[in-house]
Amino acid sequence: MNPDRLVVRLAAVAALNNFLRAPFPTLAGGMIFDSRIQPMEDFKTKKVFPFCIVYTDYDRDHWEHHTVNVKTDRLLTVTFELLVAQVTELPHDEGFVVSQPNTDSELETTLDIFEYQVAKAFKADNAAADCWRHLMVSYVNVISRRGATVEGGSKLAARQITVEAKMPRGPANGALAPAVAHFLDELEKHEEYQERVPVIREMYQSAASLSHAEQLLQTMGWTSEAGHLIGYERGPEVLLPDDIVYVDQSGDPLP
Amino acid sequence: MGIFDRLDQVVSRTVDAINEITFVFTPMAATPNGRSKPDASRSAIEDGKGVFDYIETEYGIELGVRKSYREANDLRALQTGREAFLSVDRAYFPTVADEPQQGDIFEFPEKPDLPRFEVVSVRRDGMSRLSIRLVHLGSQA
């Protein structure tokens, strides 16, 4: 397993909040949350809807092993939950403001504009969107579902978008793909992430200190005994000497 | 002020006087995914009084169930824990902007065995008090 899943999630957040700098690509501004656990409420003063939460849900065949390596694609599902609530009533003569919808119809329009902006943010020219495009190699399934409620005391409309994509399982040799490396460098410049990024980089690069045989054992998931029987030993690399004499069936040296 | 509002305030103060625990309230501010720091724009409370509940509870942990798409499981692990609630008279918070918000910190200096607590939600009880749901930041006591 490699840290791609967590990098995809961080890249999605950074692509949607533009590394927490204006101009923000969506109407949620900086209110893009990574895997938020706390309930959404208490938006009395500073925090206003709309906002988005990013989760990585479902990861299939992401542990590298000789039985899955060649036969199946790794599939990762990234879930976006977009919520828009009616929090402010504008005077009717002010017209439509995307972030402050007045009617149910306007609320739905805002929600759809929000989703459009989210989709567009992953096509932008920045390190985060580029990393997303690199890791989410091929979309298999993109589904958007809608929900709404008045139970929290305000009208709230939501969309849940699940993006299922094929993902790489490697590289197993400790190499860092340029798109990922560039994104991690950008992310490291931000105070919130600067202590986390070296840990992530180390996860990618730790295999570099292993021998080729050990990298292969790790990728294929063979037992040490099986590895020994087919010539892949742990420890320092076993090199064949130069003076090997090859013999034929009768024991005579081959020319 | 109606007679019932007045009665409610008298009851509220009596409840505090009998069951009170001293709390320290520290407003915090954070970026959406960042660590929080004390929020200087709101005032802290050094010597507040409230009623604190710390009830034992046991519940399963839900693992992202999104049924119509991929079936997922509830985790089999059970978490035993304690649910922390604090009831505080709204008199401590003159305006809505002063009221505790998600992420703010409560501490109980009289009970050093209690950890620090973070605010999860704040609801008015409809009368003169706030009902504040907390999660502990240190180990449970």
Image: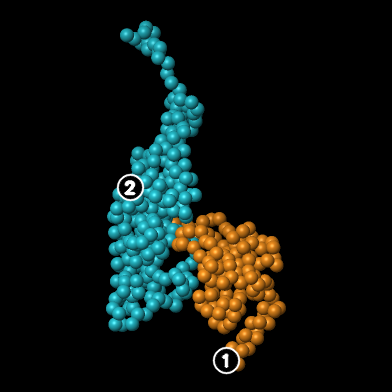
Name the foreground residue: A215 vs A247: A215
Q: Which mark is residue A134?
A: 2
Q: Residues within 10 Å of mark 2 (few under 14, many from 20)?
A: some
Q: SS of the residue at dot 1?
A: loop
A37 horizontally vs A102: left or right = right
- To which chain does the residue with label 1 belong? B
Q: Which mark is residue B1?
A: 1
**Callout 1, which amino acid?**
Met
Q: Residue at x 46, y 73 (%)?
A: A45
Q: Residue at x 61, y 76 (%)?
A: B88
Name the foreground residue: A187 vs A153: A187
Q: Quadrant of the N terminus of chain A?
A: top left
Name the foreground residue: B14 vs A222: B14
A165 horizontally vs B56: left or right = left
Q: Quadrant of the C terminus of chain A?
A: top left
Q: Position of residue B132 (x, y in %)?
A: 57, 72
* Residue B89, visible in the rendered structure: yes
Q: Are marks 1 and 2 in contact (CB under 8 Å)?
A: no
**Callout 2, which amino acid?**
His
Image colour assigned to chain B: orange
Q: CA distance from mark 1 to mark 2?
A: 64 Å
A9 up-or-down from B123: above or below: above
Q: Quadrant of residue A78?
A: bottom left
A119 up-or-down from A63: above or below: below
Image colour assigned to chain A: cyan
A36 horizontally vs A113: left or right = right
